[in-house]
Image: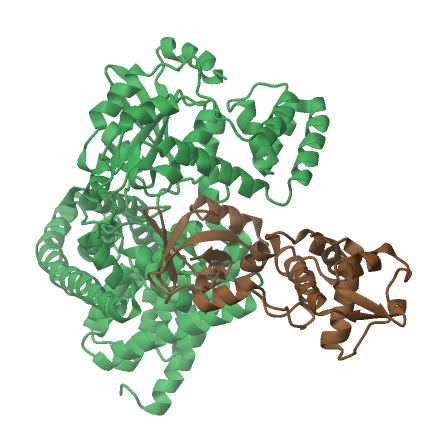
Amino acid sequence: MATCCSKQTETTFSGNARKVALVGNPNVGKSVLFNALTGAYVTVSNYPGTSVEVSRGNATVNGQQWEVIDTPGMYSIHTITEEERVAREILLHETPDLVIHVLDARNLERMLAMTIQLIEAGLPVILVVNIMDEAERMGLSIDLELLQQKLGIPVIGAATARKRGIDEIRAAMSAYRCPCEQQRFEYSRLLERDINEVAGLMQSDYILSRRALALLLLQQDEEITELVSQREGDGYAALAEKVREIAFDRRESFHLDLSLERNEMGRRIVNGVFFAPEKRVVTAAERLSRLAVQPLTGMPMLLIVLYFGLYQFVGVFGAGTVVDFLEKQIFVEIFNPWITSTIKALIPWEVIQELFVGEYGIITLGIRYAVGIILPIVATFFIFFSFLEDTGYFPRLALLVDRLFKHFGMSGRAVIPMVLGFGCDTMATMVTRTLETTRERIIATILLSLAIPCSAQLGVIMSLLSKFPGALAVWGGCLLLLFIVVGMLSARILPGEAPMFYMEIPPMRLPQVGNVITKTYTRMQWYFMEILPLFVLASVLLWLGKITGFFEVMINAMTPVMASIGLPRETAVAFIFGFFRRDYGAAGLYELQTKGLMDARQLTVAAVTLTLFIPCVAQFLIMKKERGWKVAGAIGIFVSLFAFGSGYVLNKALLVTGLLS
Amino acid sequence: MKLSEKAEEILEALWIAVEEGGAAFLDPEKMDFPADDPAYRELTGYAMIEIRQGMIYFRPEGINEGKMTIRRHRLAERLMMDVLNIRGDDGEFKACQFEHLLNEGADVKVCTMLNHPTTCPHGKPIPPGECCAQARAEGDLGVVPLTEFKSGQEGEIAYIQTEDNKKMQKLMAMGVLPGNKIVLVQAYPSYIFRVGYSEFAIDTNLAKEIFVRK
């Protein structure tokens, strides 16, 4: 069975970095361990399924170089979801020298099923029993020594979030020697016979043991079937026939039988290892959790969270106080005059001066918008979001709104991309990947690109309309209405099944400040890498448009459109801005409003149209990447037409009713 | 005492004719086998029926046996349709074979698993057995979908019933396996249940597919 050892020895002495893969169920602390080992920062969260992508980092352990690979959570080697497939890819194709299985001490019995699978696959496994601190608080005790004996692999107890056990894990990594005789977990006689029959027909060598592959073939795992059929060549026909025969014989309950057998193995292993107190300990966190998920207390709690987090912290503090300070005091009063005079002194040509410090200058407009307006709003939003994420509140929110979201053709799971969308729609569009069905992803993408304003836009629009409370109400009402209408329509129109909802609910935790900061920092970093070039590019294009006169042509071309929705021609500029980023466009409106060019009705119409209008270039590119050209293009066209159509209707409605005038 | 299959079929036909049809006797002509079949002698030997002027009559001892035989037949029908999803003539045929296995306590098990059904798939009543009366007396709900549990109620997972293989695997990966303990924490707006030390939220459709017993 010792398939792993023979392959490992070569790399060990070749001086190359050895590879270690972290695997395990969702939300057991793989990413925390990754960060602790590598000193790098991967976003860690208290939300199952957050690591959609594989992160890699380097670590030096006792002078040895290691490449550490963090994988998305998986429940079993037999993969069902996209994330699980990504995780298994690593095991299948990267030949890790070591696999660290991280599991949650409280659910030892259940999660051991995967440890068994990993050992059975002949992989070099170390088991990390994590979250020991919370387990101890609940009165659980685990005999790690005995567990190690029973499993025949190194077992380490840890609480990675509290930095407990990290040194032991490092020590175990460098001391790891593949056991010559791997523990063998016996299934029932009948299943053993089937496994042997299938495994006996395999000729090639694989990274995973034949025994594990045989089981995966019997589970009708498509990817493995594909892999084996390629490797086996001519011999595959006989193998496929055997698999079909057995699978047919056991068609009634193969998956169930296998799970039950593994469950039983887990039960036998934890017997004498795992001790739980007679009476369940109910922690304070659990009590809070109860309050969060009951509609009667949960809804007020949601409102409190939104009021303090979103309105007070992001809106009033971020978009108000901080923006005022940065944009008005630092940029407009101090920085811009200084840089303008400096540039003018340095560069004699007026055209080039314009490029940097003119009306649409890279510095005076691009950087000012990015740093002075967008940065504080987005930063405060990400702090709020990261904090909430780490408390474990989102899964609770998801189950609270699931029933409601089903009307829009989405499951409660979609609440995360929707909330994140209020921060950055582009990022949120990426996160729609965690939704189960394509249909759900498309609906979420449509709603994100249409009716969810991002924080930057939200901040600007709030300050724009704050002088007219009625306008703010109309704007909010319009968006809510359109969200509901478009959501319900797409749920009816788009073909496919209604989504199902299931989600693991992690315990509520008090977020660690360091973690929240790290997370906010990485998100900010991503955000700035993405938007700053666009802001600069937009400035350059606008500058080019201005000096070539193309800009003027564009504005003229858009004037009839603007007029049809009752807006002054100058707003065309904001809409052209808006093509680059919606917040950029909103900031453009802000300029117009300060100049006193628009009344309340016009502002409202412009704000609604712009909010609905085409998502920013970045979001469109991500949409294309995630959904493909066809879907992204269709959504783009739909959203543009819908935005102007709604603007037109709203303008007429406001004129007729005389509201806001 | 174990009756032959044919004897059981005679009892069933007689019971339906007498108890449900209101007749006083059954004409052996209506059976699929000749009137001199040894099965008749078997039944008269146990003093369950008597044959007068070529017609079959119940003796008091036979009525109860007939009732139990009918009960097993209809339980078998329910099993075929509800659990195994075999319908129509095929289901009927299989039920006819299966019913003969439902003796010596197997009927109690099946009846409990089916949660003491009162009617067969054709809408005819299933005569209640002792287990049904006992369950009623104890207020035992038997095996029910998770949706029937009250918040805070504890039970054991009996089986998962879903046509969708992926769903089944997902549930199993979450620890929803027959024999595991389960606590329903909350039922609205979503179902929250606890297995081991983990909590999961699922929607009504999934909750309907998890069958639990107290």
Looking at the image, which residue is at 38% across and 9% down?
A14
Query: Is residue A546 in sight in this rendering?
Result: no
Looking at the image, which residue is at 35% across and 88% down?
A655
Locate residue A648: give its quadrant. bottom left
Q: In the image, B201: left or right of B3?
A: left
Q: Quadrant of the C terminus of chain B?
A: bottom left
In the rendered view, tell whether residue A471 sits above or below residue B170: below
Chain shown in green = A
Report the front residue among B34 and A122.
B34
Q: Looking at the image, which residue sits at the far top?
A: A13
Q: Position of residue A200 (x, y in %)?
A: 64, 21
Report the front residue among A336 and A226.
A226
Chain shown in brown = B
Q: How many marks?
A: 0
Q: In the image, A248: left or right of B211?
A: right
Q: Looking at the image, which residue sits at the far bottom?
A: A657
Q: Position of residue B168 (x, y in %)?
A: 52, 49
Locate residue A331: give its quadrant. bottom left
